[in-house]
Image (cartoon, rainbow, N blue to C red):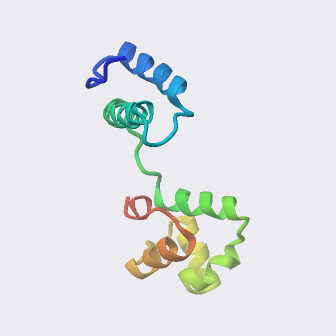
Amino acid sequence: MKATIIKTEKQHNEAMERIDELFDAKQNTKEFDELELLVMLVSAYEDKYYHIEAPDPIEAIKFRMEQQGLKRTDLIPFLGTRSRVSEILSGKRKLTVNMMRNLYQKLGVPAESLLA
């Protein structure tokens, strides 16, 4: 497949099929270079046509809690008191910059989600 900017769904599907074929390519080979290029082209196409918005900050926090098996009380070191955690998760209080920084640095909640 000749690598070119992907403009149609058909080209996208062809590129995806070729990526599947090249998936186990060894580094420092022409096949691996082709794989990397195709991944970049597919990514650019998908960003343009299948862009997914960052989740709501509260949903992002709840998702991370679920992933890590955290309870509301586990958020106290990042958000403050038990009541503050409850207010944040119910949407009654906004996150402060400091809270966002803590959630990002210590729990790995994506910054783009916290800032949404």
Above or below residue 96? Residue 40 is above
Nearer-the-camera pick, 37 or 49: 37
Nearer-the-camera pick, 49 or 86: 49
Residue farthest along the front direction in this orientation: 29
The residue depicted at 56 percent of the width and 63 percent of the height is 61
Q: Position of residue 94 (x, y in %)?
A: 43, 72
The residue depicted at 54 percent of the width and 81 percent of the height is 79
- Residue 114: which quarter of the image? bottom left
Q: Position of residue 25 (x, y in %)?
A: 52, 34
Along the horizontal axis of the image, is 29 left or right of 21?
left
The residue depicted at 52 percent of the width and 61 percent of the height is 58
Nearer-the-camera pick, 48 or 66: 48
Q: Position of residue 88 (x, y in %)?
A: 53, 71
The residue depicted at 32 percent of the width and 17 percent of the height is 8
Q: Position of residue 9 (x, y in %)?
A: 38, 17
- Residue 68: which quarter of the image? bottom right
Above or below residue 35? Residue 99 is below
Q: Quadrant of the N terminus?
A: top left
Along the horizontal axis of the image, is 86 left or right of 47?
right
The tally of labels here is: 0
Along the horizontal axis of the image, is 81 left or right of 9?
right
Above or below residue 52? Residue 82 is below
Q: Quadrant of the C terminus?
A: bottom left
- Residue 98: which quarter of the image? bottom left
